[in-house]
Image (cartoon, grey):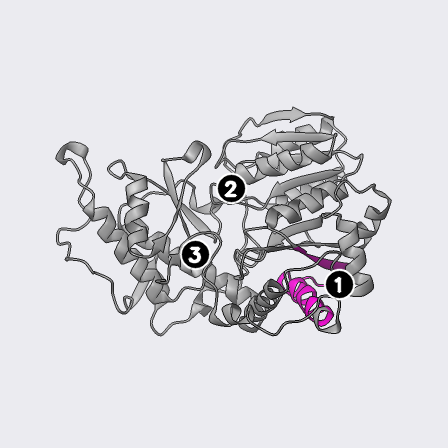
Amino acid sequence: MEKLLLFTPGPVNVAANVRAAVGLEDICHRELEFEDLLRSIEGRLLQLFEIRNEQDYQAVVITGSGTAANEAMLSSVVGDQNILILSNGEFGDRLHAISQVHNQNTGFIQFPWGEPINLEVVAEYLQNHQIDFIALAHHETSSGMLNPLGTIGALARVNGSALLVDCVSSAGAESIDMERDNIAFCSSSSSKAIGSYPGLSFVIGEVLEYEKLKSIPARSAYLNLYKFFEFAIGRSQTPNTPAIPLFFALDQALANILNEGVRHRRAKILRTAKILRHEMKELGLTFFLNTEDMSSVLTTVFVPPYVDIAVFRQRLREESIIIYAGKGPLKDRVFQIGNIGEFSDTDVFQFIAVLRETLNKFRIPEDAGITILSQHVPDPPMLPTVPPLSVVVNGEVIFSKTALVDSLGSDHSRTIPGDSAPVAGEITSSI
Protein backbone atom coordinates (compact mmCIF):
# COMPACT_ATOMS: atom_id res chain seq x y z
CA MET A 1 0.00 0.00 0.00
CA GLU A 2 1.36 3.41 -0.97
CA LYS A 3 2.00 5.83 1.88
CA LEU A 4 -0.76 8.37 2.35
CA LEU A 5 0.03 11.89 3.53
CA LEU A 6 -2.64 12.67 6.12
CA PHE A 7 -3.13 16.44 6.09
CA THR A 8 -5.88 16.04 8.65
CA PRO A 9 -6.33 16.94 12.34
CA GLY A 10 -6.18 13.22 13.16
CA PRO A 11 -5.48 10.44 12.74
CA VAL A 12 -2.05 11.55 11.60
CA ASN A 13 1.12 10.18 10.09
CA VAL A 14 3.24 8.83 12.95
CA ALA A 15 7.00 8.68 13.44
CA ALA A 16 8.82 5.48 12.49
CA ASN A 17 9.73 4.70 16.10
CA VAL A 18 6.07 5.08 17.14
CA ARG A 19 5.09 2.61 14.43
CA ALA A 20 7.79 0.22 15.63
CA ALA A 21 6.67 0.54 19.26
CA VAL A 22 3.38 -1.20 18.47
CA GLY A 23 5.34 -4.39 17.80
CA LEU A 24 7.31 -4.49 21.04
CA GLU A 25 7.31 -7.45 23.39
CA ASP A 26 4.17 -9.08 24.76
CA ILE A 27 3.45 -8.21 28.38
CA CYS A 28 0.62 -8.75 30.84
CA HIS A 29 -1.30 -5.74 32.08
CA ARG A 30 -1.30 -7.00 35.68
CA GLU A 31 2.48 -7.32 35.88
CA LEU A 32 5.34 -4.97 36.73
CA GLU A 33 6.19 -4.26 33.09
CA PHE A 34 2.85 -2.62 32.43
CA GLU A 35 2.91 -0.74 35.72
CA ASP A 36 6.26 0.79 34.74
CA LEU A 37 4.87 1.65 31.30
CA LEU A 38 1.77 3.32 32.73
CA ARG A 39 3.79 5.36 35.23
CA SER A 40 6.04 6.52 32.39
CA ILE A 41 3.05 7.68 30.33
CA GLU A 42 1.41 9.44 33.29
CA GLY A 43 4.59 11.35 34.09
CA ARG A 44 5.23 12.31 30.50
CA LEU A 45 1.67 13.58 30.08
CA LEU A 46 2.16 15.96 33.01
CA GLN A 47 5.40 17.16 31.40
CA LEU A 48 3.61 17.66 28.08
CA PHE A 49 1.12 19.93 29.86
CA GLU A 50 3.98 21.71 31.64
CA ILE A 51 2.40 21.10 35.04
CA ARG A 52 4.55 22.96 37.55
CA ASN A 53 3.31 21.18 40.69
CA GLU A 54 3.18 17.61 39.40
CA GLN A 55 2.44 16.18 42.83
CA ASP A 56 -0.93 17.96 42.74
CA TYR A 57 -2.09 16.40 39.44
CA GLN A 58 -2.79 12.94 38.09
CA ALA A 59 -3.20 11.62 34.56
CA VAL A 60 -5.34 8.55 33.87
CA VAL A 61 -5.26 6.69 30.56
CA ILE A 62 -8.40 5.16 29.03
CA THR A 63 -8.65 2.60 26.24
CA GLY A 64 -11.08 4.47 24.02
CA SER A 65 -11.27 7.52 21.76
CA GLY A 66 -11.26 11.13 22.90
CA THR A 67 -15.03 10.91 23.23
CA ALA A 68 -14.52 8.21 25.88
CA ALA A 69 -12.37 10.59 27.92
CA ASN A 70 -14.96 13.34 27.53
CA GLU A 71 -17.73 11.03 28.67
CA ALA A 72 -15.66 9.80 31.63
CA MET A 73 -15.16 13.42 32.65
CA LEU A 74 -18.73 14.62 32.17
CA SER A 75 -20.39 11.53 33.66
CA SER A 76 -18.16 11.42 36.74
CA VAL A 77 -17.53 14.99 37.83
CA VAL A 78 -20.83 16.89 37.90
CA GLY A 79 -23.16 14.70 39.95
CA ASP A 80 -26.15 16.75 41.11
CA GLN A 81 -24.38 20.06 40.59
CA ASN A 82 -24.87 22.48 37.70
CA ILE A 83 -22.84 22.55 34.51
CA LEU A 84 -22.83 25.03 31.63
CA ILE A 85 -21.68 23.87 28.19
CA LEU A 86 -20.27 26.49 25.80
CA SER A 87 -20.28 25.59 22.12
CA ASN A 88 -19.35 27.16 18.82
CA GLY A 89 -19.11 24.00 16.74
CA GLU A 90 -19.64 20.28 16.45
CA PHE A 91 -17.49 19.22 19.38
CA GLY A 92 -18.99 21.69 21.81
CA ASP A 93 -22.38 20.36 20.71
CA ARG A 94 -21.12 16.84 21.38
CA LEU A 95 -20.13 17.81 24.93
CA HIS A 96 -23.67 19.05 25.43
CA ALA A 97 -25.14 15.80 24.09
CA ILE A 98 -22.97 13.75 26.47
CA SER A 99 -23.82 15.94 29.45
CA GLN A 100 -27.54 15.70 28.75
CA VAL A 101 -27.31 11.91 29.04
CA HIS A 102 -25.68 12.04 32.48
CA ASN A 103 -26.45 15.40 34.09
CA GLN A 104 -29.93 16.68 34.75
CA ASN A 105 -28.70 20.19 35.47
CA THR A 106 -27.11 21.05 32.13
CA GLY A 107 -27.16 24.58 30.73
CA PHE A 108 -26.12 25.33 27.17
CA ILE A 109 -25.01 28.45 25.30
CA GLN A 110 -24.61 27.79 21.60
CA PHE A 111 -22.84 30.20 19.25
CA PRO A 112 -22.65 29.81 15.46
CA TRP A 113 -19.84 27.71 14.04
CA GLY A 114 -16.76 29.88 13.61
CA GLU A 115 -18.00 32.67 15.89
CA PRO A 116 -15.93 33.50 18.99
CA ILE A 117 -17.50 32.76 22.37
CA ASN A 118 -19.02 36.03 23.54
CA LEU A 119 -17.85 36.58 27.11
CA GLU A 120 -20.57 39.15 27.81
CA VAL A 121 -23.26 36.58 27.03
CA VAL A 122 -21.52 34.01 29.24
CA ALA A 123 -21.03 36.49 32.10
CA GLU A 124 -24.70 37.46 32.02
CA TYR A 125 -25.72 33.80 32.16
CA LEU A 126 -23.42 33.19 35.12
CA GLN A 127 -24.94 36.15 36.98
CA ASN A 128 -28.41 34.63 36.65
CA HIS A 129 -27.57 30.96 37.32
CA GLN A 130 -25.65 29.00 39.89
CA ILE A 131 -23.00 27.21 37.84
CA ASP A 132 -20.45 24.85 39.38
CA PHE A 133 -18.70 23.73 36.18
CA ILE A 134 -18.16 25.21 32.74
CA ALA A 135 -17.22 22.87 29.87
CA LEU A 136 -16.00 23.68 26.38
CA ALA A 137 -13.78 22.45 23.56
CA HIS A 138 -10.43 24.23 23.50
CA HIS A 139 -9.88 23.70 19.79
CA GLU A 140 -13.15 23.45 17.88
CA THR A 141 -11.95 21.18 15.10
CA SER A 142 -15.10 21.61 13.00
CA SER A 143 -14.07 25.21 12.22
CA GLY A 144 -10.42 25.37 13.30
CA MET A 145 -11.17 27.98 15.96
CA LEU A 146 -9.10 28.12 19.14
CA ASN A 147 -11.23 29.13 22.11
CA PRO A 148 -9.49 31.32 24.74
CA LEU A 149 -8.98 29.31 27.93
CA GLY A 150 -7.29 32.21 29.71
CA THR A 151 -10.21 34.62 29.55
CA ILE A 152 -12.87 31.96 30.08
CA GLY A 153 -10.88 30.50 32.97
CA ALA A 154 -10.62 33.92 34.60
CA LEU A 155 -14.36 34.45 34.21
CA ALA A 156 -15.02 31.01 35.72
CA ARG A 157 -12.74 31.75 38.67
CA VAL A 158 -14.56 35.00 39.45
CA ASN A 159 -17.84 33.08 39.35
CA GLY A 160 -16.56 30.24 41.54
CA SER A 161 -16.87 27.70 38.71
CA ALA A 162 -14.30 25.14 37.61
CA LEU A 163 -13.41 24.37 33.98
CA LEU A 164 -13.75 21.01 32.24
CA VAL A 165 -11.94 21.25 28.91
CA ASP A 166 -11.92 19.06 25.82
CA CYS A 167 -8.30 19.34 24.66
CA VAL A 168 -8.58 16.40 22.28
CA SER A 169 -7.08 18.16 19.26
CA SER A 170 -5.10 20.90 21.01
CA ALA A 171 -2.88 18.97 23.45
CA GLY A 172 0.65 18.95 22.08
CA ALA A 173 -0.01 21.79 19.65
CA GLU A 174 -1.30 24.64 21.83
CA SER A 175 -0.30 26.06 25.20
CA ILE A 176 -2.58 24.75 27.97
CA ASP A 177 -2.01 26.05 31.51
CA MET A 178 -4.23 24.08 33.86
CA GLU A 179 -2.96 25.80 36.98
CA ARG A 180 -3.34 29.35 35.69
CA ASP A 181 -6.66 28.86 33.93
CA ASN A 182 -8.63 27.19 36.72
CA ILE A 183 -8.96 23.88 34.85
CA ALA A 184 -10.16 21.09 37.13
CA PHE A 185 -10.03 18.38 34.46
CA CYS A 186 -9.07 18.21 30.81
CA SER A 187 -9.29 15.40 28.29
CA SER A 188 -7.34 14.49 25.18
CA SER A 189 -6.47 11.76 22.72
CA SER A 190 -3.38 9.90 21.54
CA SER A 191 -4.06 10.32 17.83
CA LYS A 192 -3.93 14.06 17.24
CA ALA A 193 -1.03 16.44 17.91
CA ILE A 194 0.63 13.98 20.29
CA GLY A 195 1.38 11.88 17.22
CA SER A 196 0.34 8.35 18.12
CA TYR A 197 -2.40 5.97 16.99
CA PRO A 198 -6.15 6.21 17.68
CA GLY A 199 -7.55 4.15 20.51
CA LEU A 200 -6.28 5.77 23.70
CA SER A 201 -7.42 8.88 25.52
CA PHE A 202 -6.66 10.42 28.88
CA VAL A 203 -7.88 12.79 31.55
CA ILE A 204 -5.63 15.03 33.64
CA GLY A 205 -7.00 16.55 36.82
CA GLU A 206 -6.12 17.93 40.21
CA VAL A 207 -5.75 15.25 42.87
CA LEU A 208 -8.11 17.19 45.14
CA GLU A 209 -10.73 17.23 42.38
CA TYR A 210 -10.36 13.49 41.82
CA GLU A 211 -10.86 12.84 45.53
CA LYS A 212 -14.19 14.68 45.42
CA LEU A 213 -15.46 12.10 42.93
CA LYS A 214 -15.48 9.34 45.54
CA SER A 215 -18.75 10.63 46.99
CA ILE A 216 -20.49 11.00 43.60
CA PRO A 217 -22.51 7.92 42.56
CA ALA A 218 -21.07 6.31 39.42
CA ARG A 219 -23.08 6.88 36.24
CA SER A 220 -20.92 4.63 34.07
CA ALA A 221 -19.27 1.32 34.88
CA TYR A 222 -16.49 1.42 32.28
CA LEU A 223 -15.93 5.20 32.27
CA ASN A 224 -15.95 5.75 36.03
CA LEU A 225 -13.23 8.39 36.36
CA TYR A 226 -12.74 7.86 40.07
CA LYS A 227 -12.10 4.15 39.49
CA PHE A 228 -9.40 5.01 36.93
CA PHE A 229 -7.84 7.39 39.46
CA GLU A 230 -8.04 4.80 42.25
CA PHE A 231 -6.34 2.13 40.12
CA ALA A 232 -3.69 4.59 38.92
CA ILE A 233 -2.55 5.87 42.31
CA GLY A 234 -3.01 2.63 44.21
CA ARG A 235 -1.80 0.03 41.73
CA SER A 236 -0.34 1.77 38.65
CA GLN A 237 -2.89 -0.13 36.62
CA THR A 238 -6.14 0.44 34.73
CA PRO A 239 -9.52 -0.94 35.87
CA ASN A 240 -10.06 -2.84 32.61
CA THR A 241 -7.81 -4.62 30.13
CA PRO A 242 -5.83 -1.92 28.29
CA ALA A 243 -4.76 -1.92 24.63
CA ILE A 244 -1.13 -2.59 25.55
CA PRO A 245 0.47 -2.06 22.08
CA LEU A 246 -1.12 1.40 21.94
CA PHE A 247 0.35 2.22 25.35
CA PHE A 248 3.83 1.44 24.00
CA ALA A 249 3.14 3.70 21.01
CA LEU A 250 1.82 6.56 23.17
CA ASP A 251 4.83 6.34 25.48
CA GLN A 252 7.17 6.61 22.49
CA ALA A 253 5.23 9.52 20.96
CA LEU A 254 5.42 11.41 24.25
CA ALA A 255 9.15 10.66 24.51
CA ASN A 256 9.61 12.11 21.02
CA ILE A 257 7.93 15.37 22.03
CA LEU A 258 9.87 15.68 25.28
CA ASN A 259 13.17 14.91 23.57
CA GLU A 260 12.44 17.60 21.00
CA GLY A 261 11.12 20.01 23.62
CA VAL A 262 7.44 20.74 24.26
CA ARG A 263 7.64 24.37 23.20
CA HIS A 264 9.86 23.59 20.25
CA ARG A 265 7.28 21.07 19.03
CA ARG A 266 4.49 23.64 19.35
CA ALA A 267 6.58 26.19 17.46
CA LYS A 268 7.29 23.64 14.74
CA ILE A 269 3.56 22.96 14.30
CA LEU A 270 2.82 26.69 14.12
CA ARG A 271 5.62 27.16 11.60
CA THR A 272 4.14 24.47 9.34
CA ALA A 273 0.72 26.13 9.60
CA LYS A 274 2.24 29.48 8.59
CA ILE A 275 3.96 27.95 5.57
CA LEU A 276 0.76 26.26 4.40
CA ARG A 277 -1.33 29.39 4.90
CA HIS A 278 1.15 31.55 3.04
CA GLU A 279 1.33 29.15 0.11
CA MET A 280 -2.45 28.68 -0.06
CA LYS A 281 -2.96 32.44 -0.10
CA GLU A 282 -0.51 32.59 -3.00
CA LEU A 283 -2.86 30.20 -4.82
CA GLY A 284 -5.74 32.62 -4.31
CA LEU A 285 -7.46 30.59 -1.59
CA THR A 286 -9.28 32.30 1.27
CA PHE A 287 -9.88 31.17 4.84
CA PHE A 288 -13.00 30.72 6.94
CA LEU A 289 -11.53 32.30 10.09
CA ASN A 290 -9.59 35.42 10.89
CA THR A 291 -5.94 34.67 11.58
CA GLU A 292 -6.21 35.60 15.27
CA ASP A 293 -8.93 32.98 15.79
CA MET A 294 -7.09 30.11 14.08
CA SER A 295 -5.41 27.27 15.91
CA SER A 296 -1.99 25.95 14.95
CA VAL A 297 -3.57 22.59 14.14
CA LEU A 298 -5.46 23.15 10.90
CA THR A 299 -6.69 25.70 8.38
CA THR A 300 -10.29 25.81 7.17
CA VAL A 301 -10.35 26.95 3.53
CA PHE A 302 -13.28 28.13 1.45
CA VAL A 303 -13.99 25.91 -1.57
CA PRO A 304 -13.44 28.04 -4.70
CA PRO A 305 -16.65 28.49 -6.73
CA TYR A 306 -15.22 26.58 -9.68
CA VAL A 307 -14.32 23.47 -7.63
CA ASP A 308 -16.41 20.37 -6.95
CA ILE A 309 -15.27 19.35 -3.48
CA ALA A 310 -15.92 15.62 -3.94
CA VAL A 311 -13.92 15.52 -7.16
CA PHE A 312 -11.26 17.74 -5.59
CA ARG A 313 -10.73 15.39 -2.65
CA GLN A 314 -10.70 12.36 -4.93
CA ARG A 315 -8.03 13.91 -7.16
CA LEU A 316 -5.88 14.67 -4.13
CA ARG A 317 -6.40 11.12 -2.92
CA GLU A 318 -5.16 9.83 -6.27
CA GLU A 319 -1.93 11.66 -5.42
CA SER A 320 -1.87 9.97 -1.96
CA ILE A 321 -2.99 13.11 -0.11
CA ILE A 322 -5.90 13.05 2.33
CA ILE A 323 -7.74 16.18 3.49
CA TYR A 324 -11.01 16.75 5.36
CA ALA A 325 -14.19 18.13 3.86
CA GLY A 326 -16.43 20.51 5.77
CA LYS A 327 -19.47 19.20 7.60
CA GLY A 328 -22.60 20.48 9.26
CA PRO A 329 -23.31 24.07 8.14
CA LEU A 330 -19.90 24.10 6.43
CA LYS A 331 -20.60 21.08 4.23
CA ASP A 332 -19.55 21.75 0.61
CA ARG A 333 -18.39 25.24 1.64
CA VAL A 334 -14.94 24.49 3.05
CA PHE A 335 -12.17 21.94 3.22
CA GLN A 336 -9.65 21.53 6.04
CA ILE A 337 -5.88 21.15 5.94
CA GLY A 338 -4.29 19.71 9.07
CA ASN A 339 -0.60 20.06 9.84
CA ILE A 340 0.10 18.02 12.97
CA GLY A 341 1.41 14.81 11.44
CA GLU A 342 4.94 13.56 10.98
CA PHE A 343 5.74 15.71 7.93
CA SER A 344 8.99 16.76 6.35
CA ASP A 345 9.28 20.12 4.63
CA THR A 346 9.45 18.24 1.35
CA ASP A 347 6.08 16.63 2.18
CA VAL A 348 4.58 20.06 2.82
CA PHE A 349 5.77 21.52 -0.47
CA GLN A 350 4.78 18.34 -2.30
CA PHE A 351 1.27 18.93 -0.99
CA ILE A 352 1.32 22.54 -2.20
CA ALA A 353 2.51 21.46 -5.64
CA VAL A 354 -0.25 18.85 -5.93
CA LEU A 355 -2.80 21.35 -4.63
CA ARG A 356 -1.77 23.86 -7.30
CA GLU A 357 -1.91 21.24 -10.04
CA THR A 358 -5.31 19.97 -8.87
CA LEU A 359 -6.86 23.43 -8.74
CA ASN A 360 -5.55 24.20 -12.21
CA LYS A 361 -7.22 21.09 -13.63
CA PHE A 362 -10.68 22.43 -12.87
CA ARG A 363 -12.28 24.21 -15.81
CA ILE A 364 -12.90 27.87 -15.03
CA PRO A 365 -15.48 29.80 -17.07
CA GLU A 366 -14.05 32.91 -18.70
CA ASP A 367 -16.81 35.06 -17.24
CA ALA A 368 -16.32 33.81 -13.67
CA GLY A 369 -13.99 36.65 -12.83
CA ILE A 370 -11.38 34.21 -11.52
CA THR A 371 -7.72 34.42 -12.46
CA ILE A 372 -6.07 31.22 -13.63
CA LEU A 373 -3.56 30.21 -10.98
CA SER A 374 -0.71 29.66 -13.38
CA GLN A 375 -0.06 30.60 -16.98
CA HIS A 376 2.17 27.59 -17.50
CA VAL A 377 1.01 24.38 -15.87
CA PRO A 378 3.59 21.62 -16.39
CA ASP A 379 2.50 18.12 -17.23
CA PRO A 380 2.15 15.91 -14.16
CA PRO A 381 4.02 14.89 -12.14
CA MET A 382 5.01 18.33 -10.93
CA LEU A 383 6.18 17.36 -7.43
CA PRO A 384 9.36 19.13 -6.35
CA THR A 385 12.20 17.02 -5.01
CA VAL A 386 13.29 19.81 -2.65
CA PRO A 387 11.37 22.76 -1.20
CA PRO A 388 12.11 26.37 -2.15
CA LEU A 389 15.03 28.11 -0.49
CA SER A 390 12.79 30.25 1.69
CA VAL A 391 9.27 31.38 2.48
CA VAL A 392 8.76 34.89 3.83
CA VAL A 393 5.52 36.07 5.49
CA ASN A 394 5.22 39.75 6.45
CA GLY A 395 8.97 40.11 6.28
CA GLU A 396 9.57 37.06 8.50
CA VAL A 397 11.46 34.06 7.14
CA ILE A 398 9.43 31.08 8.30
CA PHE A 399 11.21 28.47 6.22
CA SER A 400 14.70 28.15 4.83
CA LYS A 401 16.94 25.24 4.11
CA THR A 402 19.42 26.49 6.69
CA ALA A 403 17.28 28.30 9.27
CA LEU A 404 15.60 26.38 12.06
CA VAL A 405 12.44 27.18 13.94
CA ASP A 406 14.32 29.26 16.54
CA SER A 407 13.36 32.53 14.85
CA LEU A 408 9.73 31.90 15.79
CA GLY A 409 10.39 32.07 19.52
CA SER A 410 9.58 29.43 22.11
CA ASP A 411 5.86 29.89 22.50
CA HIS A 412 2.77 31.74 21.37
CA SER A 413 -0.33 32.90 23.14
CA ARG A 414 -3.91 33.61 22.11
CA THR A 415 -6.29 36.40 22.96
CA ILE A 416 -9.76 37.41 21.88
CA PRO A 417 -9.61 40.57 19.73
CA GLY A 418 -10.94 43.50 21.72
CA ASP A 419 -13.08 44.74 18.86
CA SER A 420 -14.85 41.49 18.05
CA ALA A 421 -18.53 42.02 17.45
CA PRO A 422 -20.97 40.72 20.06
CA VAL A 423 -22.73 37.51 19.19
CA ALA A 424 -26.06 36.65 20.74
CA GLY A 425 -25.65 33.04 21.72
CA GLU A 426 -28.62 30.72 21.69
CA ILE A 427 -29.17 29.73 25.31
CA THR A 428 -30.92 26.63 26.54
CA SER A 429 -30.97 25.39 30.08
CA SER A 430 -32.43 22.71 32.29
CA ILE A 431 -31.15 24.43 35.41
**Front one among 430 and 373:** 430
Identified at 48% across, 68% down, the residue is 15
| x then y, percent, for residue 99 | 68, 36
Question: Which of pointers 2 and 1 lies earlier in the amino acid sequence?
Answer: 1
Q: Residue 165: where, in percent of width, then height?
A: 65, 46
Residue located beneath label 2 in the image: 417
Note whether residue 119 is visible.
yes
**Kind of residue sitting beneath label 2:** Pro
Which region shows up in magenta? 35-62
Placement of 292 over or under 408, stated as above or below = above
**Residue 69 x, y percent position in the rendering:** 66, 49
398 to the left or right of 252: left
Counting residues from the start of the chain, the first of labels 3 and 1 encountered is 1
Q: Residue at x 53, y 37 (%)?
A: 90
SS class, disc 2: loop
- Quarter of the image holding residue 171? bottom right
According to the image, label 3 marks what residue? 339
User: Image height check: is 369 above or below 150?
Assistant: above
Name the residue located 41 percent from the left edge and 60 percent from the top edge: 272
Amino acid type shown at disc 1: Gln
Categorize mark 1 by other alpha carbons within 10 Å: few (<14), some (14-19), many (20+).
many
Left/right of residue 270 with respect to residue 186 in the rendered view: left
2 vs 3, front mark: 3
Q: Main secondary structure of the magenta part?
A: helix
Q: Which mark is residue 237?
A: 1
